[in-house]
Image (cartoon, rainbow, N blue to C red):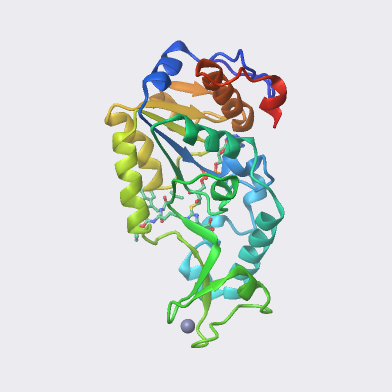
Amino acid sequence: MGAFAPGAWTLTAEFSDRLLARLADAKFVVAFTGAGVSAESGVPTFRGAEGIWKKSKPEELASMNAFMKNPALVWEWYAHRKKLIASIQPNRSHTALVRMEQMFQQFAIITQNIDNLHRRAGSRTVYELHGNIERNYCITCGRPQTNEEVLRQPGVPRCPACGGLVRPDVVWFGEFLPEDQWDASVRAAESADVFISIGTSGVVYPAASLPVMAKLRGAFLVEVNPEPTPLTERADEFLQGASGGIMSALVARLSAGKSGPPLTEQSLQS
Ligand code: BV8
Ligand code: ZN
């Protein structure tokens, strides 16, 4: 459970025998991701200083109250994030999780991220707890709208069918999570053999209750984060560092264990 300098995570990284043994026996592995996983792609995290927009905390902007009070400000923030996310690429954390999906009988990603980077990287089983920034809909008639349609409209986009206000299809504070995504996530957490919480501060609920749910159901709980979080004391293994290097090294180690060709530093970088 050591702290490693960035980049120190290599094939020989110190993954405990317990972790490797649990992964070797695992039928169902679940990854639970937050903003930290997309940080290495250039997406600002929430709690970092760069999360603030025009002096407003994300919690203040990501709410129906804020939208009703000042839809232009809220749209400015989402338009900025849509353009930023469209301009960046998934990183090694995302690709490592795509590889892990091929390694285990059952694998699922539960994400709080709305950036769609897991899917863009090629992951198939992805539960989006807080929505997806690439979708939008009219708050009056529900008509969906693509990012192209909303971003070509100046100012606050309107619904071409009824003239209603259009909002991003994300979950705002005080709003319930999409039932199908939540139910699937609870089922996954309750039946995971290994549950890996990656790049999340674990303060937003009900999402943050999932790692604890998994642990209580007997999963081996792993946390990957440069900083300890409220979850760290419950984790069976705390891998302290940036997720890109750690997840790539873990996949390399697992592939080396399995029949696959031994991986080199090069393939770690790819
Ligand atoms: C609800 C979409 C029912 C929008 C988001 C119980 C207790 C207390 C409060 C509540 C509670 N239940 C409900 C609440 C209220 C609220 C809540 O949890 N508030 C918090 C702030 C206390 N929850 C809700 O409102 C939820 N709805 O409960 O509905 C209800 C209904 C009516 C009335 C009452 C209840 C809805 C929550 C969803 C909100 N929407 N996003 C948008 O994005 O615009 S939440 C948003 O913030 C993200 O999706 C994510 O969930 C969260 C940010 O957290 P993280 O992803 O963890 O990011 P963060 O920046 O915090 O941390 C990054 C981490 O990465 C750090 O630890 C850092 O060290 C690490 N890191 C950095 N670099 C790296 C790294 N890790 C690895 N590698 C690196 N390179
Ligand atoms: Zn409409």
Query: Is residue 242 visible to us here?
Result: yes
60 relative to 163, above or below: above
Which residue sits at x=72%, y=55%?
87
Q: Is residue 60 left or right of residue 219?
A: right
Q: Is residue 183 left or right of residue 140?
A: left
The residue furthest bottom is 162
Looking at the picture, tell me which residue is in the foreground, 152 or 23: 23
Give residue 129's position: percent from left, percent from top: 42, 52
Which residue sits at x=41%, y=25%?
235
154 relative to 129, above or below: below
Give residue 83's position: percent from left, percent from top: 69, 61
* Quadrant containing the C terminus in the rendered view: top right
Give residue 27's position: percent from left, percent from top: 35, 28
Count of numbered tags: 0
Looking at the picture, tell me which residue is in the foreground, 69 or 46: 46
Looking at the picture, tell me which residue is in the foreground, 245 or 167: 245
Looking at the picture, tell me which residue is in the foreground, 17 or 5: 17
State the image quarter where residue 245 is shown.
top right
Which residue sits at x=64%, y=59%?
81
State the image quarter where residue 151 is shown.
bottom right
Give residue 3's position: percent from left, percent from top: 59, 18
Q: Is residue 89 left or right of residue 254?
A: right
186 relative to 249, above or below: below
Which residue sits at x=34%, y=33%?
192
Query: Is residue 54 visible to us here?
Result: no
State the image quarter where residue 7 is shown.
top right
